[in-house]
Amino acid sequence: MDYRYLSTTKGLGGRIKQLPQDFIVEEIGDDYQTSVKYLPDKKIETIDWDNIFKNKEEGKDYLILDLEKHNLSTMQAISQMSRFLRLSKSRFGYAGLKDKRSISSQKISLYNPELERLSKFYFKDIKTYNPFWSSKKIDIGDLKENRFIITIRQIEGFSKNEIETLINKVIIEINQKGLINYFGEQRFGGAREVTAKVGKHLILKEYKKAIMLYLTSPSPYEDQDLKNAREDILKTNDFKKWASSFPSKSGFEVPILNHLANNPDDYLGAFKSLSKSMQYLFIHAYQSYLFNEMINYRIDKGYFLNPIEGDKVINEVLNLQLFGYDSKFLDGMAGEVEKEIFKREGVDFRHFFNKDYSVLSCRGDFRPVLTFPKDLKLISVEDDDLNSGQMKATVSFILDKGQYATVLIREIIKKEDIG
């Protein structure tokens, strides 16, 4: 994915996420804020689970917890808890998905968990604390903002004073101009950048292409055993072999392979074997890709982020479409830009409606092209303790839900490969 910059300050270079604790995420709701306290190695205070369950009130069936996770996605953490607690994933609630390569804290809810299992739960990269009972589950609409504390490492060629000066100049520019409200690389599957491509095949009802692309497309950063597995599946279609031996670190391929091992031609069924939250990601990733491409096309044409004829402006901010089956081309020059993107992609609005499987349908919406982070500040500049002779810098800021910290970090680093 190609990203452009609004700030003109010279880039520092460097990388993020060398350690999970270099990327801290804390969740902010309308009436709560979580904070990272324990991971990776601090022992949690003992919870009196007997007392928590003894004082449960009638009608309050949802146990609310702070979930802190280390180098796990939200869904991976929930999967671990689901297996241990013998609690269906459908009985878990969460307000947002947090980065895998991070330490993050967020609210979750569990519907009627069992005391015995919960009191014995342990997983070294998961901490749960601050329990209380509620009549309401945690849901997507509860998330308002996320606070990030991010460390950039491997900065070289600059003194401490130069780093401080450059970052503070970027902060001033961002506070004045805002950030381009791109969808970040996490939306597109991280290093593999495969999610939106799979999503496009799915909306075109090319189910075999979608599933095979997801199973076999490698990343240069993957371990060799995983690359070998993907290559062998592409050559042999031996789903039975890999259903039992696919490298476990990969995550979501195994349920797909298990389904195809018994139903080798049922690629839509294989897709349905994924969790609903995972299924939605692919279609939304393709919507997001089109949104990002629209921004880049307008910049390349010289329109930049200024409204043109036919554009939708809300609260003095330009909004572009997240395309769906209810979308319509805008009038004027704005509509011509949209038509050009659709022509280039070979899609139209009807492709976003699937009468056979509603998960593969999306209605459409609008999204602002600019966002303004809150409380953006430089915390520290120090010698990089992991990389001799180099420097590290730590910044913190708050973004609205659905916005991406990596977009802001790119304005400081100014290079494509940031971590």
Image: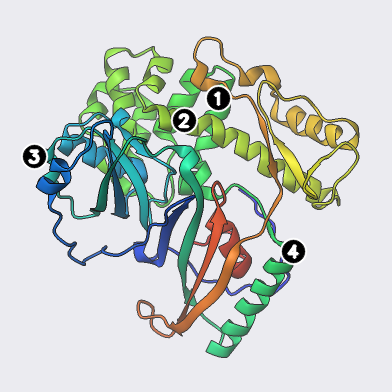
Please name which of the two marks, 1 or 4, marks the residue nearer to the observer.
Answer: 4
| Position above or below: 117 against 299 | above
**Residue 29 location, x and y as percent?**
47, 50
**Residue 271 location, x and y as percent?**
41, 22
| Position above or below: 237 against 144 | above
Residue behind mark 3? 116
Identified by mark 3, the residue type is Glu
Instruction: Identify the residue at the far top of this view.
Output: 356
Please report contact status of discs 3 and 4: CB closer than 8 Å, yes or no: no
Q: How many residues crowd mark 2 within 10 Å: few (<14), some (14–19), many (20+)?
A: some
Going from N to C along the chain, the mark reached first, 4 or 2, is 4
Find the distance from the CA under tag 4 to the CA under tag 2: 39 Å
Please report contact status of discs 1 and 4: CB closer than 8 Å, yes or no: no
Residue behind mark 4? 177
Residue 213 is marked as 2
Give the left or right position of residue 262, taking residue 346 as reference.
Answer: left
| Position above or below: 232 against 203 | below
Find the distance from the CA under tag 3 to the CA under tag 4: 54 Å
Identified by mark 1, the residue type is His
Going from N to C along the chain, the mark reached first, 1 or 3, is 3
Which residue is rendered at x = 42% and y = 63% of the image? 23
Identified by mark 4, the residue type is Lys
**Residue 363 location, x and y as percent?**
63, 24
The residue nearer to you, when weighing 209 against 17, is 17
Find the distance from the CA under tag 1 to the CA under tag 2: 9 Å
